[in-house]
Amino acid sequence: MALLTAKGLSVSFQGVSIFSDVSLSIEEGVKYALVGKNGAGKTTLFRVLTGELLPDDGEIFVSSAARTAYFSQNPVFGRGRSVIEELYENFSHLRELHRRLEKAAEEMDRSPEAFSLYQSLWEEFERKGGLDYETEIKKVLTGLNLTSLEQSSVDTLSGGEKMRLGLARLLLSQPDIMLLDEPTNHLDLGSVRWLAGYLNAFRGSVILVSHDRYLLDAVVTRVLDLEGGSLTLYKGNYTQFRVQKNEDMAYQEKLYQRQKREAEALEAYIRKYKAGNRSTQAKSRENRLKRLTVVDRPARFQYRMSLDLNGFQESGHEVLRVSKMRVRDLYEVRDLHIRKGDKVGIIGPNGSGKTSFFRAIREGKPGVRWGHNIRISLFDQELSLYDHSLSLTAYLNRFYDLDEFEARQALGHFHFSGEEAYKIIGSLSGGERSRFKLLTVMLESPNVIMMDEPTNHLDMDFIDILEEALSSYRGTLLAISHDFYFLKRLCRSFIRIADNRFVTGGPGLLDLEAGISSEKKDGGKAPEGDQGEYGVSKKERNQIKKKKEMIIRCEERIHTCEEALAALEDQMHARGDDFAFIQSMEKERRELQRELSDCYKEWEELHGAEGKDPFND
């Protein structure tokens, strides 16, 4: 049964078509993904389906009994209410019934009619879910990590907390059709996993716009692909859709090329023999050409770019050492060692202190030691830029010393072409700002990249490009993310910050956080007296500890050699015209290089030994 049907929808803005002749049917109980690049019109289609925006053409039919609810990026709440009061608003009819029940109960001793009224009200209260709604509220509060904020005023909530509250309110409204626009933007991995389970158990229909591939694969069974202004329906989850679409595109391209060659051959024959003694055959082929319907070439948007992050100067082998650093009043980092080329995923619930950890190591708090020749670039959640009033070209000129031609060339590479190169930074959408921020990261040539939720606001195609670039990145990556697929593809080492603990480990920590591990939640706790190598035996931990001590001593020597070599080369450069001095220092430089080479060799042997450390294996 179709709860919602749309036929021939068309929308344009200022003469530019967003989509045209779009038709769809939303079946009861079916979960759909709506996919397409940023700017394809997904949010516009949602606004049309909810009646917020009138289409230029087309019509929408909604079942008379169906209720539709839309989760957007800008939820609005009643001023002065607490979080729990905001959620109780969904059940105001049940709360009123409960008040009437209490009143009828008080009057039963005085009036025989009150008992009959009480019985009738109780049956209605029970039928409408009055016995379960408090439990349902608690379940959603826990799942979306809002329990500690129950009594907080909505006016004091952060942007992320308001988004989670808006999602909670929508889920509890129990509509027949949910339209969810990027519901995971402020959810941690645990909450994403919980949401997937909730939506799977939900009996109504869902249309889901999300960049979270884990959620899409876990929930949806149909994919609506909005591309080039047209909408195409595919069966299966998101991964199955990607395979199916690629196969369809390859087949359509093959069919187009075959029919194009046939048409070109007919045209060539007609031109050659139209006026000759084979004019009859030429006329026959002309009729055949008229009847030939050449299919349109498959039009697929693709970012024609490759993001290269490897144009940097090498850092020293030891990138970051943290010892006995307290992060606010949340947890202590007792011993952390990041080496050149490590790719480390940082996971944990919202509010556990992941961004605070980034801030602490960037500020160089006591206990933090950065290695030699470190150049850091930060991709933060706020996508911070120095001046929002500048155009993109002016920004690159002022802060990166690019002239207009160089700036436009760089911007074009990131799909800011034509007049888009002169957009004001303050007017950029989330996706555009993310792309521009990545351009600035590339221009900074960092050998250490720190990223806080980098996939927020990016469409799937650009996430693929980002993952490819980071996969081939030879520098050091520290990434806070709730995107399970992103972390799984890129990172081999993980830091889990939760329950006032800072735990290091291998991929098992990610599986634990995403709920894939068969271990219970408590299984992720670090062994007593350890920083936290998850999932290894006591014997293995002892091996790891012994090897760590040897590696630490080796890396201390590497660090000392690197600093001494850098200082010596600076002296030689400063006195480059003093041949006698250069000659006397050259021998010392060669000895330092030999010692450094021996240290590297020793480190590699230790690193490849049995009893591997799951954090830096």
Image (cartoon, rainbow, N blue to C red):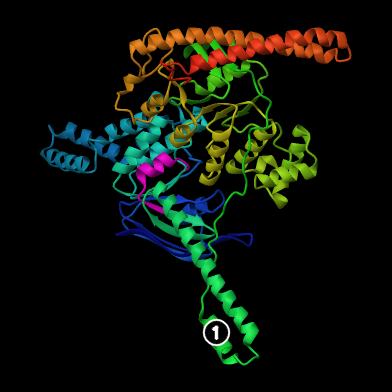
Q: At label 1, which amino acid type do we have?
A: Arg
The quadrant where residue 362 appears: top right
Question: Does any portion of residue 325 appear in the rendered image?
Answer: no
Q: Secondary structure at mark 1?
A: helix
Q: Residue 526 or 388: which is nearer the viewer?
A: 526
Q: Residue at x 51, y 15 (%)?
A: 605
Q: Provide residue 523's location: percent of width, then percent of height.
A: 32, 20
Left-right relation of 469 to 519: right
Q: Residue 153 or 237: which is nearer the viewer?
A: 237
Q: Residue 501 or 538: which is nearer the viewer?
A: 538
Q: Residue at x 53, y 45 (%)?
A: 459
Q: Which residues are magenta?
A: 211-223
Vertical side of 218 occupied by 548: above or below: above
Q: Provide residue 259's location: percent of width, then percent of height.
A: 52, 71
**Residue that mark 1 sits on:** 285
What quarter of the picture does the N terminus occupy?
bottom left
Q: Is residue 212 magenta?
A: yes
Q: Provide residue 126's location: percent of width, then percent of height.
A: 20, 40
Q: Provide residue 269's location: percent of width, then percent of height.
A: 60, 82
Vertical side of 586 occupied by 165: above or below: below
Vertical side of 146 occupied by 93: above or below: below
Left-right relation of 235 to 439: left
Question: Does any portion of residue 68 appear in the rendered image?
Answer: yes
